[in-house]
Image (tube, rainbow, N blue to C red):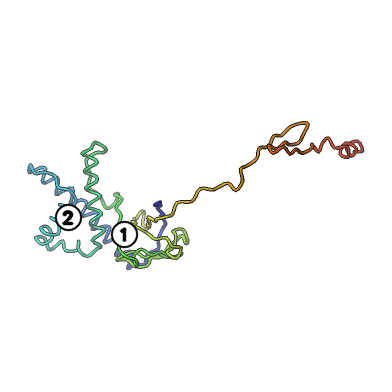
Amino acid sequence: MYRSFKVEIDPTPEQITKINKTLGVCRFVYNLFIAHNKERYKNGESFVNGNTFAVWLNNEFLPNNPEYSWIKEVSSKAVKRSIDDADAAFKHFFKGRCGYPQFKKKSRSDVKMYFYRGNSIDCKCQRHRIKIPTIGWIRLKEKGYIPTTDSGLYILSGRISKRAGRYFVSAMVDVPDKEPAVAETEGIGVHLGVKELAVLSSGESYENINKIAKIKKLEERL
């Protein structure tokens, strides 16, 4: 069973620079995908999906526009995921599930930096910190919330987001399903009465203590 855990992180100034740069590139590539397809539609050409756009970006756009070489300076996995997100937005639009995809603005749009576990040394987590590819170890503000690697669980993927100057990480963890509780006995029925305090389904009964002679004598004395 996959579970997502979200917690605030406390990156260093150097890590903040890397995260902001990656978020900026992801936003730019997302918008470029929309602009590229709008231009193709305007010229009477067909829509290109995420995979075709990624090939065009790496083999045509970047070689012909070296001033955008900074796109290659961040995680390629984060860039590819931003393309997939834009592709999914268009597919939802074509199916009538939402409106036409809009450009993401720096001040208002929710852009995330995607990462995933590519090998055994990626995406480790300890009680007070988490390791993210291309970023390194980042301190957690809420300790012990995300399952640690030492517990035998591991992070499959995740995203870093920014909101109001604060940074958060969402981690997808493969958590084993809990085994359903098994009753150790077959159970027993209890009937509460007036004459008897309780009668069990096994046939055993308990006398109502209010009917005991000793209790009655004590009540009379009182």
Name the amino acid type tagged 1: Tyr
> Which residue reaches farthest right?
221
Counting residues from the start of the chain, the first of labels 1 and 2 encountered is 2
On screen, 209 above or below 161?
Answer: above
In the rendered image, the vertical position of residue 104 relative to residue 153, given as above or below: above
Callout 1: helix, strand or loop? strand
Mark seen at residue 98: none
Gap between marks 1 and 2, in whole Å?
A: 19 Å
Q: Position of residue 132 (x, y in %)?
A: 34, 64
Query: In which quadrant is the C terminus drawn?
Result: top right
Rendered view: 16 above or below 47? below
On the image, the x and y values in percent for residue 174 come to: 39, 55
Which label sits on residue 116? 1
Could you tell me residue 56's position as x and y percent?
A: 12, 55
From the viewer's side, name the closer residue of 42 and 3.
3
Residue furthest to the front:
203
- Left or right: 184 in relation to 16: right
Residue type marked 2: Ala
Q: Residue at x 37, y 59 (%)?
A: 155
- Residue denoted by label 2: 54
